[in-house]
Amino acid sequence: MGWRDDWPSMPDGSEYNGMQLLPLVRAGKSPFQGVWDVNLPIREIEEHTNTKITDIATVRKGSNNYGLHLKASNRPDLMARLARGDVNMPDFDGFPIEWQAPEAAFEAAVYDLLRTEPAIRASRLIYHRVPVLHPGPNRSIPLDLAGRRLFVFEKAEGRDKVWRELSKPDKLRLLDQLATVQAALFHYTPPLDFAQRHLLDRLYDFMPETLSHPVAPTREFWLHVMEAKIDATIRNEGALIGWEDDHETVGPGALAAKKSLLRALPHLIPRETTDGSLYRLALDHGDFGVHNTTVKVTESKGRGPLVTSLFDWETGCIVPAILSDPLVAVDPVDLAADERGEPSVARIIPKEHASSDMERYTGWACHYIQSLYTNAPDYKFAIQAGKDIRH
């Protein structure tokens, strides 16, 4: 079955439009029939939020999740995010439970952590459940949804994916909003106990099994992390290197590169400043951009769009301030800063664009980075100080 559900079609062969889901379910014509039971998340959400779901206004398809806009009997609207992949599917080949469970736990912890940080505008989580792997072989479609992560949020005002419909001035106003949120995130220092619980899991493959140094906002600790990361990536001669499917092993060349990297690290990583700002703990979103925000577009002249929520923190991580990533994704480019801290366009999809398009994208990057530095002047210094280790 692969790693996620296919989006369903209607009996006439047309693609399901995401509307009228509850009436279709009640009539026994659920578009998802035979794949997952829509009644199951409704009952689970009702039980854990003490409400009655009266309607599903829309259901949408994301890369990894369904998004369900829920109407409730006694509270404001909810947004439910249900994974499109179930770890208990037959022949499931998506991210294994060993990745998914800690990832879901981390994301939930982030929402709880940032609840008292309104400037970052993290979505307000109401209920969540991590996926659970059933024991034994998986030979049939699961009858429950235990293998799918489920998150339920208060629905923020506004909509996502508004970038293309905005006017040129409103695009710049939205970039100002995003820069304000990014600056607030850069200035936020997560508690030490939070970092102690989650930092190792958020290093991603290839990661060491343990860290021998206690988590601390110091140059010594982050130097140890980088050394451990290199050692976990390039192990002993003959060990696998890279992804398993590549069947590559560590040879003399890789070992020589490893030794060179380890010798170079102390010279690449800068000395700490007197205020201790370069190695303080920082929380990175991991996929910061307009596609992971809810935006309220107002008609009031001069007010412009307002970011009301920032969601999808599952690829977030904990880094030293010098490795904090200022990048913001808009459509169809990523706006970032180069090693000198100057505005840059990091990615364009598709790659073929006219020179006039590049001029516009560069203008967006300049506006965003200037606004970011206005809100966080120390961000540019951190990027410049860490340019060698970032490279």
Image (cartoon, rainbow, N blue to C red):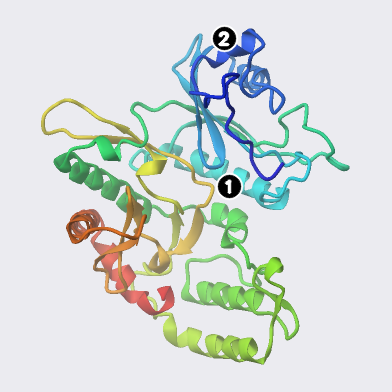
Please determine whether, in this image, residue 370 is positioned above or below residue 140.
below
Q: The residue under label 1 is which amino acid type?
A: Phe
Looking at the picture, how far across and down is residue 151, in whole percent?
Answer: 57, 33
Quarter of the image that includes the C terminus: bottom left
Measuring 44% from the left and 87% from the top, which residue is drawn there? Answer: 267
Please state which of residues 216 and 102 is positioned toward the viewer in this rendering.
102
| Residue 52 seen by the camera | no
* Circle 1 residue: 106
| Direction right: furthest residue | 136
What is the distance, in whole Å, between disc 2 and disc 1 at their CAs? 36 Å
Please determine whether, in this image, residue 144 is positioned above or below residue 183.
above
Q: Which mark is residue 23?
A: 2
Please determine whether, in this image, residue 9 is positioned above or below residue 202.
above
> How many numbered discs, if any?
2
Measuring 44% from the left and 55% from the top, which residue is drawn there? Answer: 284
Q: Secondary structure at mark 2?
A: helix
Q: Where, by quadrant of the figure, is residue 363 drawn?
A: bottom left
Q: Where, by quadrant of the figure, is residue 343 drawn?
A: bottom left
| Residue 290 seen by the camera | yes
Looking at the picture, how far across and down is residue 255, in whole percent?
Answer: 64, 88
Please determine whether, in this image, residue 228 is positioned above or below residue 153.
below
Please state which of residues 315 and 270 is positioned toward the viewer in this rendering.
315
Please state which of residues 322 and 212 is positioned toward the viewer in this rendering.
322
User: Does residue 202 appear to the left or right of 158 in the view shown?
Assistant: right
Looking at the picture, how far across and down is residue 332, in whole percent?
Answer: 33, 51
Quarter of the image that includes the N terminus: top right
